[in-house]
Amino acid sequence: MYTYHVRRSSANQQYYWTLEAGNSEPIAWSGETYINKTDCLNGLNLFKTHAPTAPVNDTTATSARRTSTLEFELFKDVKGEYRWRFQAGNNRIIGVSGEGYITRQGCLDAIGRVKANAGRAPIVDHTQTVATLY
């Protein structure tokens, strides 16, 4: 079962989200940290709502161009690995792959798993604290 996790970074106390597969491996994350929790949750909900139906723009193909306001962009990173990022029409990155893939097909398969599970995954908020009673 896939699950979203909202956490705070120990380095800067900012918020981020991950989408983890049933084996607890992160398959997607927010790609950045957010100063406030509301912005983090807004990004997560945008991803959760639109990722299942978003098109894939394969920029490794010669004729690739933006096809949608919200889309998965498949690209090669500096190591030559295939990755994806989910971005808005203004190029704002909303989510990124949790890892690089050796093959294009491996990356496309990962996008398929995200699309199949992103919309129905529950959200666990690890930033909520319970007051200690004295």
Image (cartoon, grey):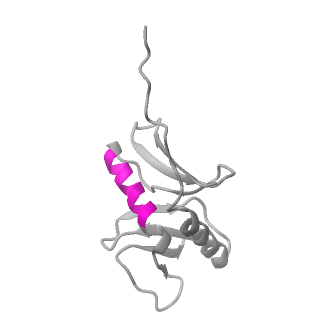
On screen, residue 108 versus residue 75, left or right, reads right
- Place of residue 91 in the rendered image (x, y in percent of width and height, measured from the top left): 34, 70
47 in the magenta segment: yes
Residue at point 40%, 57% (across, down): 45
Residue 36, visible in the rendered structure: yes
Picture quarter with the N terminus = bottom right
Residue 66, visible in the rendered structure: no
Front residue of 26/12: it is: 26
- Place of residue 24 in the rendered image (x, y in percent of width and height, measured from the top left): 65, 49
Q: Image height check: is 127 above or below 101?
A: above
- Place of residue 35 in the rendered image (x, y in percent of width and height, measured from the top left): 33, 43
Residue at point 32%, 43% (across, down): 36
Front residue of 63/110: it is: 110
Q: Which residues are magenta?
A: 38-49
Front residue of 126/100: it is: 126
Q: Image height check: is 52 above or below 9?
A: below
Q: Total of numbered circles in the picture?
A: 0
